[in-house]
Image (cartoon, rainbow, N blue to C red):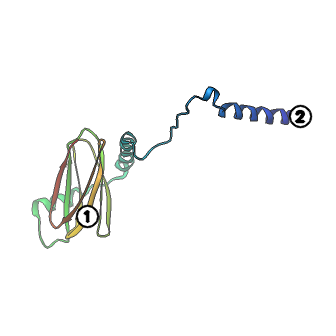
Amino acid sequence: MRKLFLFATLILITYSCSVNYNNYPVKKTYPSTGNTNNSSINTEGEYSELIKTYKPETTEVLNDLLNGSSDHSKTSVSVHNKSRCNMVLTINGGGYYKKIPITAGKIGYAMVPKNQNYTLSGMVCSSAYNKKTFISSSYSITLSN
């Protein structure tokens, strides 16, 4: 009898919580991929996760920039993030894929195979950046909001 009473109480509580009295509008709180605020939040979360394990290629990039040689198979890509927001830059193309977390006001960099088409993309604050480019030598861009 006690189990039946608990079961009935549970059903009543569940039913009363789902009833929309007086037909008040119900606000849905599901995340939306088109909302720029959610995109900024997602970028910051992705940045926080990546920065924990990211290993920059500092030595290789500096060697390429200072001693740039045409006989190497790789070249450097550097991105100066002049915005007030952290960002994640995605480099994709020619069988190469890498995500680089770039702190606000800092420079992010990577070594990529030369003579390939790449797509560089990311969110800078609430603005999307997306560019396709052919990289054959050191490549540098500056992003701001």
Residue 88 located left or right of residue 71: right
Residue drawn at the location 65% of the way across and 34% of the way down: 18
Q: Quadrant of residue 5?
A: top right
| Viewer-proximal residue among 119 and 104 | 119
Q: State if disc 1 and disc 2 touch (CB < 8 Å).
A: no
Find residue 135 and report its image quarter.
bottom left
Q: Quadrant of the C terminus?
A: top left
> Which residue matches tag 1?
118
Mark 2 crowd level (few <14, some 14–19, many ≥20, 10 Å Cα): few
Number of on-image labels: 2
Q: Is 16 above or below relative to 34?
A: above
Q: State the residue lying farthest toward the right.
A: 1
Q: Secondary structure at mark 1?
A: strand
Measured along the vertical axis of the image, is residue 122 above or below residue 17?
Answer: below
x 11%, y 68%: residue: 69
User: Mark 2 and mark 1: span between their CA atoms?
Assistant: 69 Å
| Kind of residue sitting beneath label 2 | Met
Image mark for residue 85:
none
- Residue 44 is situated, as x and y percent measured from the top left of the image, at 36, 43
**Res. 11 image quadrant:** top right
* Residue 8 at x, y percent in the picture: 80, 34
Q: What residue is shown with label 2? A: 1
Q: Dot 1, crowdedness within 10 Å: few (<14), some or many (≥20)? A: many
